[in-house]
Amino acid sequence: MAGDTPDFVSMLRELVAAPSVSSTRPELDTGNREVTEKLADWLLDLGFSIELLDVPDRPEKVNLIATLGHGSGGLVFSGHTDTVPCNPARWTSDPFTLDERDDRLYGLGTADMKGFFPLAIEALRPYVGRQLREPLIIVATADEESSMHGARALADAGKPRARYAVIGEPTGLVPIRMHKGIMMERVSIQGRSGHSSDPALGCNALECMHAVIAELLACRDQLQDEFRNDAFAVPTPTLNLGSLHGGDNPNRICGAAELEYDLRTLPEMQIPVVRDRLRSRTREAALKFGAEIETAALFNGIEAFELPAASDLVATCEQLTGEAARAVAFATEAPYFAQLGMETIVLGPGDIEQAHQPDEYLAMERVNPTIRILRGLIERYCIGDAPELPPDAAGT
């Protein structure tokens, strides 16, 4: 059983070799079923009960819930199975072939975050066949990199049920108890084209967009005056103007323009409230020009996340890693697990600096510390109180 499951490096090699790109561009999207079914097979061999759940309206997208033991509480180890797209020409080696060199494991998804799954499986091997006080649950989701549809589908279904959850995103083995939310919006302006020699012949969409952008930046300044959280390296909400397109010729009045932007929210902010505020301001600016304006969310958005500093999971992870829990600006699936009533923390072996980069890698020096930390969590929440870990449990 446990001995028949491939070792850590072999598992990671198979996961990296199975493309699972998620993208808003259909021509780049490959689905995640192959990766998820590999995980399901390995965990089934280890005695887990397996539940594969198709993601609604997403062909070839599937979530996995694998459970060892029984009970109403327990511990979740969760990660996403998808990766971002990549440009193989910018890589030193094939991104879909695991390359071991310089005490690093190179490959697409090694850090973000396929590497977490074989490490979790290595960590749980000693507990196969043992009586667990509370269940251990492995969750693998789809589409985190593009839409969060996988985690959202689980939350809508009310699954899984547990008391604690660890999201294995790349944090360098530093526990993360707080992160910002994110919303991405599109503003489309429809004006009226005409000959540039007479501005009265048209309605210039770019001039209207100029006023819209001014309103967005003014609103950003107001939000930064209203909200501040010094736990973050960037303590205020941020708004980034990401892309702008409009017009077709310098001697033609611009008839249409389109802007896309993102805004990172703090835990004390609510995305629907902020979205309504921004849309109201931009609509007023457009109406002054007599232009038509349409606003749309590029996706539903991810609320900011915060686990109280006094929670048991924070104290346990700080003890096991030797690191104080921190806050980060990037978003994860943690809010969906918190929505299900779990104490949730983000903690994984990769480094965020490696995520979404050519020559992504997982350092071998993180392997044993990660396994020890995960075993400490299993001991604490599935067996009993966590034992003292060796001095190198956090890689120090």
Image: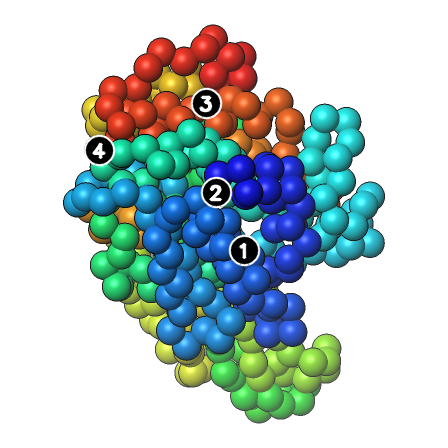
- Image vertical order of residue 269 relative to residue 374, above or below: below
Q: Earlier in the sequence, mark 3 or mark 2?
A: 2
Under mark 4, the amino acid is: Arg
For marks 1 and 3, the one nearer the N-term is 1
State the residue position of label 1.
38
Which callout, 4 or 1, points at the residue further toward the start of the chain?
A: 1
Tell me what residue is drawn at x 77 percent, y 27 percent.
102
Which residue is at 19% across, 43% downward? 71
Query: What's the distance in space between the residues labelled 1 and 3, CA to CA?
Result: 24 Å
Sooner in the amino-acid sequence: mark 1 or mark 2: 2
Q: Are marks 1 and 3 in contact (CB under 8 Å)?
A: no
Residue that mark 4 sits on: 133
Task: For the residues labelled 4 and 2, say whether their Cβ atoms are less than 8 Å apart.
Answer: no
Please provide percent x and percent y for residue 34. Answer: 57, 62
- Residue holding disc 3: 372
User: Which residue is at the front of the view, 168 or 182?
Assistant: 168
Report x, y in % for residue 293.
Answer: 42, 78
Q: Which residue is mark 2?
A: 1
Q: Nearer the viewer, residue 28 or 20?
A: 20
Q: Amino acid at mark 3?
A: Arg
Circle nearer the viewer, 3 or 4: 4
Seen in the picture, residue 259 relative to 358 is either above or below; the reply is below
Q: Three-letter amino acid code at disc 1?
A: Lys
Q: Are marks 3 and 4 in contact (CB under 8 Å)?
A: no
Badge 3: few (under 14), some or many (20 or more) residues near its Cα, within 10 Å? many
